[in-house]
Amino acid sequence: MTPAAPGIVHLTERQPQLSGEEMLASLVPPPQFDDATFESYRADPEFPSQEEAKELLTTFAVGAPPAKRGGFFSRRPKTPELKPGVYLDGGFGVGKTHLLAAIFHAMPARRKYFGSFIEYTALVGALGYRQTVDLLRGSALLCIDEFELDDPGDTMVMTRLLGELVASGTRLAATSNTPPNALGEGRFAAQDFLREIHAMADSFQTIRIDGVDFRQRSFDGHAPSLDATEYGAALAGFGTASDDGFDALISHLARVHPSRYIRLIDGVDAVGLRDVRQLTDQSEALRFVAFVDRVYDAELPIRATGLPLDQVFGEDMLAGGYRKKYLRAISRLVASAHA
């Protein structure tokens, strides 16, 4: 192992531990959505469903707006009764996560949680199903971003979990995972979501959000691969950067529960990976996806040598059942490599 230079840390030397309460405390919107509000959501006038969705979700989060002043017999306009769960149905890049974070910030509740589907299933994996239910019971709101429908076992566990929480008064807001490489390609639509969570389907109201992918251009291009000199200079430009061999990190991820990946990158300003290669093992690839999600949410740049990061998943993987997950990870790797 290369000795750590000033400002350099090795993620493979970290063995993070998290209690259940600490895991819950980490279930908040990613930093880029710290300030997401309904007011800052810029609805496209070309797609009226965006403004309609914003109004419905505002009602879901904080209730109906106050009645306007009028005559003696004026009444508050009647608003539709919303179900305990809302599902935001729309293509990639129409602002679903922004609206999900806006719900979280707007709902006046002490106990509320925001996480990706992977984070919630990791919580169950780390703590066990019953302890997870006990920790989440009594919460006012659960926001679930990128609800994954490609793993029947995880979907069944989450459906059961949500059913218990809704029965105890928890409200839900969810989106499902969408492909990052082309607008609408193979997107899970509302009917797919409701069919897969059939036991909970009646608890969700679908809110459609049409629009054009405002981020589509960001997925063009490739992740640069640096030579050794460029790599060293790049890491030296950050306050604290991690520096690990790709194979060593992949092996280390197998020894750290995914719920603790967020702690692996504590205090790091950039992630460095040497000698990136193509992944051929599905378990390794899925763990790397979970790690990439945490790096992306933390808005950390990635610098790497070896194979360009957008080629880390082979064609066989991209043609398989986890295609959407890998495509999303590639888009995030490209963005992080250019950050």
Image (cartoon, rainbow, N blue to C red):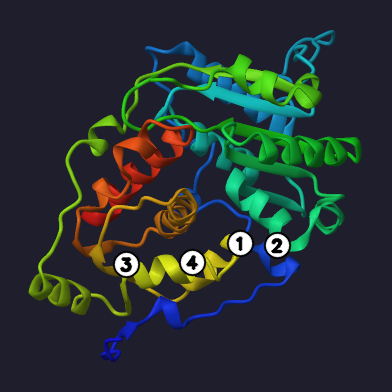
The reply, left or right, for residue 1 in relation to residue 65 is left
The span from disc 1 to disc 4 (Cα, nearest Å) is 11 Å
Crowd around label 3: few <14 · some 14–19 · many ≥20 (10 Å): some
Task: Say if 75 sits above or below 198 in the image.
Answer: above
The answer to whether marks 1 and 2 mark residues whose Cβ atoms lie closer than 8 Å is yes
How far apart are labels 4 and 2 at the CA level? 14 Å
> Which circle's residue, 3 or 2, is located before the other in the chain?
2
C-alpha separation, residue under disc 1 versus residue under disc 3: 20 Å
Q: Is residue 28 above or below residue 82?
A: below
Per the image, the residue denoted by label 4 is: 253
Amino acid residing under circle 3: Phe
* Tag nearer the camera, 3 or 2: 3
Residue visible at 61% across and 61% down?
A: 259
Crowdedness of circle 2 by 10 Å Cα count: few (<14), some, many (20+)?
Answer: some
- Residue 248: image quadrant is bottom left
User: What residue is disc 2 on?
Assistant: 126
Q: Earlier in the sequence, mark 3 or mark 4?
A: 3
* Residue 226 image position (x, y, % from top left): 13, 64
Q: Distance between the residues labelled 1 and 2?
A: 7 Å
Tag 3 residue? 246
Which residue: 40% across, 41% down? Answer: 326
Labels 1 & 3 near each other (Cβ < 8 A): no
Identified by mark 2, the residue type is Ala
Residue 337 x %, y %? 24, 55
Quadrant occupied by the N terminus: bottom left
